[in-house]
Image (cartoon, grey):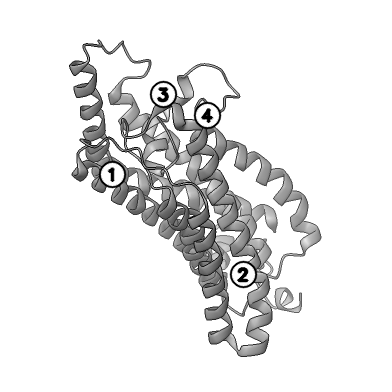
Amino acid sequence: MAQGATLPSSSVSLGVVPLRELAPWAVFAGVILLALLYLVGMDQGATSVFSGEMIHEFVHDGRHLLGFPCH
Amino acid sequence: MVRTLLVRGMLAGLAAAVCAWVFAYLVGEPALDGGIAYEDMLAAASGEAGGEPMVGRDVQSTVGLLVALLIYGVAIGGIFALVFAGVYGRIGRLSARATSAVLALVGYVVVVLVPFLKYPSNPPASSADDTIGLRTGTFVLMLALSIAVAVAAVAVGRRLVARFGAWNGVLLAVLGYLVVIGVIGALLPTVAETPADFPAVVLYDFRLSTLGLHVVLWAGLGLLFGALVDRRSSRRAAELAG
């Protein structure tokens, strides 16, 4: 933490982030971001949260090229 | 501070995704079209008329591809920033920039390259439709185990570094990761269902472009995020913002 104090007083001081501060962000943002990865990579494939084929069809090329299993 | 890191990670991910999109459009799409051509050939041979697609190829290969990569980029960028916040200052004494670069390299190997070596990407029409469940399950399992073993290797690696020094400690941790994930990879079921007459060049080019696409994405992410959180550029940004 002493390291942070020597940095300029901008909003960004790169000290070590306390785990207490990180944990809620990691859980909340982590879950949302993983859900995004699921949508782009897997939904309407082996499993479907949204019915239909629209998401799968729209992100079809990205899904193949990123290396996710597809048809 | 986590908020700032998260925002910058997502921004870096979006920018990297745009770079990856250019690569994917120029290099990946020709290979993907090769798979589509094979699919059309099969359909024509069996006399099935392909129905009108819900999303046209022109949309899939441009806007669809871009949106898919942007979503992937923003998610990977955000998670990258959160992991960065967890490891920065705790592992070694690397600067913010170097931490970002190393994290991107490790992320590429653990999240992309190692799962890819076991379950490589497949162009359209080169996989059996009815094995999608098995292929998705094993792929996710391989990915999750790769990340879990890597996290364990970092935890053990800290002790190894304390005992054997930085160079030997890191080498031993990397070796441990490779041996364990190698055994796991050997134990997981192999998927080999590419049709015998599927064009080899298409398959090769397609898989190479998957790796290339991720190289662009992860290199862009690691370098851009590093620049954004670097102390000097942060100061300049603060000055510009007044």
Q: Is residue A69 left or right of residue B173?
A: left
Horizontal side, residue A48 vs residue A56: left or right = right
Spatial CA distance of label 3 from label 4 is 14 Å
Badge 4 amino acid? Ala
Instruction: Please give the residue where the numbered disc 2 appears in the rendered image.
Output: B153
Look at the numbered discs 2 and 3 and tell me whether their residues touch, using CB distance below 8 Å: no
Do the residues indicated by labels 3 and 1 lie within the same chain of the protein?
A: no
Q: CA distance from mark 1 to mark 2?
A: 32 Å
The label nearer to you, 2 versus 3, is 2
Do the residues under discs 3 and 4 have CB atoms within 8 angstroms? Answer: no
Report the amino acid beneath label 3.
Answer: Glu
Query: Which of the labelled discs sits on residue B33, or is there none?
Result: none
Mark 1 nearby-residue class (10 Å; few <14, some 14–19, many ≥20): many
N-terminal label among 3 and 4: 4
Chain ID of residue with mark 3: A
Nearest the viewer among A69 and B210 is A69
At a point 33% along the width and 25% down the height, the residue shown is B59
Mark 1 vs mark 4, foreground winner is 4
Residue annotated with mark 3: A57
Q: Are marks 1 and 4 in contact (CB under 8 Å)?
A: no
Viewer-proximal residue, A55 or B125? B125
Indicate whether B210 appears above or below A62.
Answer: below
